[in-house]
């Protein structure tokens, strides 16, 4: 079946450090891939998405590239800020069943000033 | 303001006492979904609805019911809550499928004693 695996947290970095949060997936067909972010006490918000192989999603300095050969969608940011502290979720929506969304377990990110 | 609202935000109840969590969206979205969020497990889809009067099971539907009589509302019903349904619940909506950006409500924290 379809699944998403994220690197476990928590991840703690200093401000201006480089961030990578790993995400790999298992899916039949050609899924769409998403990163959502959850700030404390809030619901999830879409951060970025990619719908086909080699697409790069980007938003707010974050990027992720859809790699079909490695079934990965790693989230990166060149210089993190304290305001990036949140929980990040990788998710997929399989082409064969666009109604069902599979989320990863989430990665908590804390940025030190 | 475009939004998804949930009520109540917090609820403490006892085993077996029927409860309903309401969800409403004002974006004319066709697709709505319920998730539960548990530590280490990420978000798991409970039920979803592709349109009025069309609902289907997600990955963890046992112990829950939903209805979609109007486009804007998608209540979650727990007929006989049990302690293992203690969780953080999120309602979400999107334009016409899970493949599109989902907009999340603020969450309902439920405790079943």
Image (tube, coloured by chain):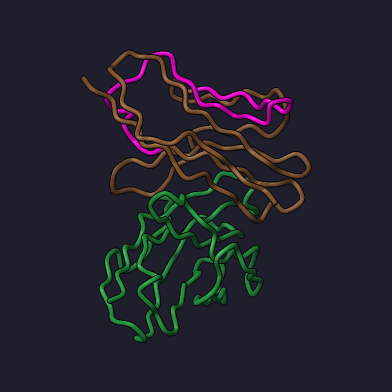
* Pick the front one: A108 or B75: A108
Residue at 70% across, 47% down: A94
In which quadrant of the rendered view does residue A39 lie? Answer: top left
- Place residue B59 in its image quadrant: bottom right
Q: Colour of chain A?
A: brown
Instruction: Depth check: give the residue in front, B90 or A4.
Output: A4
Which quadrant is home to the C terminus of chain B? bottom left
Label the green chain with its letter: B
From what the image shows, is residue A91 above or below residue B95? above
Q: Is residue A27 above or below residue A47?
A: below
Q: Where is A70 relative to B98, above or below?
A: above
Is residue A92 a member of the stretch shown in magenta? no
Residue B1 rendering spot, x and y as whole percentages: 39, 50
State whether residue B4 is above or below residue B61: above
Task: Say left or right for A49 vs A12.
Answer: right
Quarter of the rendering containing residue A73: top right
Q: Residue at image x 50%, y 62%?
A: B34
Q: Residue furthest left?
A: A113
Residue A73 belongs to the span the image colors magenta:
yes
Percent from the top left, x then y, of residue B85?
40, 70
Query: Magenta residues, as a range?
Result: A63-87
Locate residue B70, reporting x and y percent: 55, 73
């Amino acid at each position: 079946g379809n699944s998403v695996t994220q690197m476990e947290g928590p991840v703690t970095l200093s401000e201006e450090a480089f961030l990578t949060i790993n995400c790999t997936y298992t899916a039949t067909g050609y899924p769409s891939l998403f990163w959502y972010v959850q700030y404390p006490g809030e619901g999830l918000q879409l951060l970025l998405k990619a719908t086909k192989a080699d697409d790069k999603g980007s938003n707010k300095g974050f990027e992720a590239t859809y790699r079909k050969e490695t079934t990965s969608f790693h989230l990166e940011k060149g210089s993190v800020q304290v305001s990036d502290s949140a929980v990040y979720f990788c998710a997929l929506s399989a082409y064969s069943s666009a109604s069902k969304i599979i989320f990863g377990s989430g990665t908590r990110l804390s940025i030190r000033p | 303001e475009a939004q998804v609202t949930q009520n109540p935000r917090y609820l403490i109840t006892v085993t077996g006492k029927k409860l309903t969590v309401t969800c409403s969206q004002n974006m004319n979205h066709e697709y709505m979904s319920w998730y539960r969020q548990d530590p280490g497990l990420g978000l798991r889809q409970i039920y979803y609805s592709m349109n009025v009067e069309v609902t289907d099971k997600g990955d963890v539907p046992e112990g829950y019911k939903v209805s979609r009589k109007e486009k804007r509302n998608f209540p979650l019903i727990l007929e006989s809550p049990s302690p293992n349904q203690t969780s953080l619940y999120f309602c979400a909506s999107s334009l016409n499928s899970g493949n599109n950006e989902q907009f999340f409500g603020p969450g309902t924290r439920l405790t079943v004693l």
